[in-house]
Image (cartoon, grey):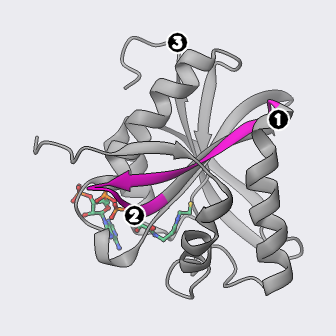
């Protein structure tokens, strides 16, 4: 297995709006309903700043070589009547294909394990999102099945449900 690049996850902060804007591009949101309006983006920025205070999740910027290269987070989600952590991610196009997302998931899993609030971490990439589904498999998630979501609201999508048991020895 090739070595993973060193990455650091830093809490999303006020001056991270620039990378959030870069994530709001057509190629970064192709499986997420397309770019959002400026108003929705600014609401999202505030949500990401506020979420740690609620204890219901965290958003991080992925840093490598002193550069912001992507974003990843985890937040509470109801899955079949149980509260689990859901994760989601993005790596800027010029940094993709280097294992940055896998490395970021490993760091995120350490944080979620240390947090200890919920046992399971889930990811729900659209079934046709080849890169994200490959990523889930590479990062050690297990495929549970398929689920229907609306994202954004009013837009039905079919997703894979990937799960990781944070209490398992094998969890990265
Ligand atoms: C998904 C994403 C974060 C992956 O980032 P990355 O840093 O390039 O990921 P990695 O390099 O760690 O690994 C990507 C894996 O996907 C594979 N992959 C890339 N494109 C693929 C495709 N179209 N079909 C199948 N596999 C693909 C790569 O080959 C690699 O697997 P490998 O290491 O076995 O070769 C990035 O593509 C992205 O930001 N996409 C847009 C945002 C998005 O869709 N977010 C997810 C919403 S659920």
Let me know if residue 133 is in the magenta part. Answer: no
Q: Quadrant of residue 137?
A: top left
Residue that badge 2 annotates: 69
Query: What is the x, y in percent for residue 82?
Result: 81, 26
Residue that badge 1 annotates: 53
Residue that badge 3 annotates: 167
Mark 3, other Cα within 10 Å: few <14 / some 14–19 / many ≥20? few
Query: What is the x, y in percent for residue 151?
Result: 77, 68
Residue at mark 3: C-beta within 8 A of ligand 1: no
Instruction: Check disc 1 and report its element: helix, strand or loop.
Output: helix
Q: Earlier in the sequence, mark 3 or mark 2?
A: 2
Q: Quadrant of residue 140?
A: top left
Q: Which residue does the image show at 46% across and 13% down from the upper left?
A: 168
Q: Is residue 132 above or below residue 143?
A: below
| Direction from residue 142 to residue 60 in the image, left or right | right
The answer to whether residue 155 is visible is: no
Residue in the foreground of this view, choosing between 140 and 85 = 85
Residue in the foreground of this view, choosing between 14 and 59 = 14
Residue in the foreground of this view, choosing between 151 and 87 = 87
Q: Are marks 1 and 2 in contact (CB under 8 Å)?
A: no
Q: Residue furthest front?
A: 15
| Direction from residue 161 to residue 55 in the image, left or right | right
Q: CA distance from mark 3 to mark 2?
A: 29 Å
Q: Which residues are magenta?
A: 55-70
Q: CA distance from mark 3 to mark 1?
A: 25 Å
| Direction from residue 114 to residue 99 in the image, left or right | left
Query: What is the x, y in percent for residue 96?
Result: 31, 68
Q: Is residue 72 above or below residue 37?
A: above
Instruction: Check disc 3 and report its element: helix, strand or loop.
Output: loop
């Amino acid at each position: 297995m090739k070595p993973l690049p060193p990455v650091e996850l830093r809490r999303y902060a006020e001056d991270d709006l620039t990378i959030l804007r870069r994530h709001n591009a057509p190629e970064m949101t192709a499986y997420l309903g397309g770019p959002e309006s400026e108003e929705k983006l600014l609401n999202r920025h505030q949500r990401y700043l506020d979420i740690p205070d609620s204890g219901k999740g965290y958003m991080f910027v992925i840093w490598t070589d002193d550069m912001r290269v992507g974003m990843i987070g985890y937040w509470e989600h109801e899955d079949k009547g149980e509260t689990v952590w859901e994760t989601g991610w993005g790596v800027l196009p010029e940094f993709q294909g280097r294992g940055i997302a896998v490395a970021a998931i490993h760091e995120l899993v350490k944080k979620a394990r240390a947090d200890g609030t919920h046992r399971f971490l889930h990811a729900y990439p659209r079934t046709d999102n080849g890169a994200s589904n490959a990523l889930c498999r590479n990062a050690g998630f297990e495929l549970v099945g398929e689920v229907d979501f609306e994202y954004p609201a009013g837009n039905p999508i079919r997703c894979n449900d990937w799960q990781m048991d944070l209490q398992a020895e094998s969890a990265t």
